[in-house]
Each structure stands twice: as C-alpha cells, then as structure tokens.
Amino acid sequence: MRRTVLLFAIATGLALGAGCGKNDRPPPPSTGAPDMQTETGPKGAQAGKIPQQAELLFREKCAMCHGLDGTGNGPGARELPVKPRNYTDPKWQESVTDDEIRKIILLGGMAVGKSGNMPGNPDLKDEPDVLEGLVKIVRRFGKK
Ligand code: HEC
C-alpha cells in the first residue's frame, strides 16, 4: 500500500516536472511559409480581386458594345462607325498601358482623341476599386 502511494507520488512528480519543462520551452518556430496562398483555385487569385460591381457594370454596360467575350461584337456596336477593339487581340493588349485604359473608361473616347461613341464614366472617379476592376476585366480578355 505504502509503496503504491510512493510510486504514485514519484510518477506525479515526474509528470509535473516534465510538464513544467515543456511549458518553459519557447514555442517552435512557425513552419508556415511567409507567402502562403490563401486563395486557391486556378482563377481564384485573379478573379478574386475584381469587385462584383465591376463585373456587373461590364456585363450591363460595356458588353453592349464590347461584347461579353470582349471581341467588340456587342449588339450596340453594330451601328457604330468606329468599332470597339478586340480585347482578346494580344497585339492590342501590348499596345496600351493600364493608364490609357483607365483614362478612356473614366473620360470617354472623345477625351483621348478616339471615338466619342465610347462613353465616359466620370462617376467612377469616386470608385477607384470598380475602375481598377474594369481595367482588370479588359486585361483578362487577353489572358487566354
Ligand atoms: C456605346 C458603345 C460602348 C460602350 C457602352 C462602351 N464602349 Fe468602350 N469603346 C467603344 C468604342 C466604339 C471604342 C473605340 C474607340 C476608338 O477606337 O476610337 C471603345 C474603346 C474602349 C477602350 C479603348 C480601346 C483602345 O483601342 O484603346 C476601352 C478600354 C473601353 N472602350 C472600355 C470600355 C468599358 C470598360 C466600358 C464600360 C464601362 C465601355 N468601354 C463601354 C464603345 C463603347
């Protein structure tokens, strides 16, 4: 009986001692990579940054002329004397800067010496995220 108690005491002491030792140790260094990808999926990273509002605006307004596929075949483009560009053309994609795309979306074709049929969207001045999203949408057509 006495032996059992003694053994128990020793065992408990060891356990406590071991426990304390463990708790004193600093936590192991984090193994997480610094550039861990939280957004997975093939298109996740690219599409995730485009605000829904920009996607909607493109579908409801821009696609009328530029087409849902970005080739410029929207129903509104049929009667236009100057047809919208084909966004999927890699040569066109290379020929313009994001700044130029941003400017024509904001100010319209007339402001940059192009067709006045390309309407401006001056209200997007206060919604830079949406404007940026539209630029990305235009660029996305070039990534096939
Ligand atoms: C009423 C038809 C129409 C609508 C709506 C329209 N566009 Fe356009 N867009 C045009 C035309 C036409 C051009 C070509 C202008 C030119 O080359 O002279 C153009 C040109 C552009 C260009 C420049 C292409 C280049 O050659 O540099 C961009 C970028 C653009 N549009 C984006 C948009 C976005 C984004 C929207 C929606 C917010 C939009 N457009 C809505 C007709 C339209």
Image (spheres, rainbow, N blue to C red):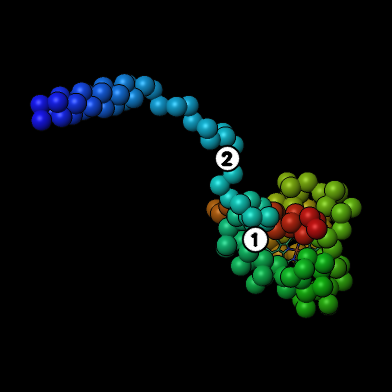
What amino acid does circle 2 point to? Met
**In terms of secondary structure, where does tag 1 sit?**
loop
Mark 1 crowd level (few <14, some 14–19, many ≥20, 10 Å Cα): some
Kind of residue sitting beneath label 1: Asn
SS category of the residue bearing label 2: loop
Residue 93: x, y in percent?
83, 52
Question: Which residue has dot 1 on it?
Answer: 121
Q: Residue at x 61, y 67 (%)?
A: 56
Furthest-left residue in view? 2
Residue 121, position as x, y percentages in the image: 64, 60
- How far across and down, in percent of the image, does residue 53 sit? 57, 63
Q: Quadrant of residue 84?
A: bottom right
Residue visible at 74% across and 47% down?
A: 98
Whichever of callouts 1 and 2 sits on the residue coming sooner in the sequence is: 2
Q: Nearer the observer, disc 1 or disc 2? A: 2
Image quadrant in which the N terminus is located: top left
The image's mark for residue 36 is 2
- Residue drawn at x 67%, y 70% is 59
Q: CA distance from mark 1 to mark 2?
A: 37 Å
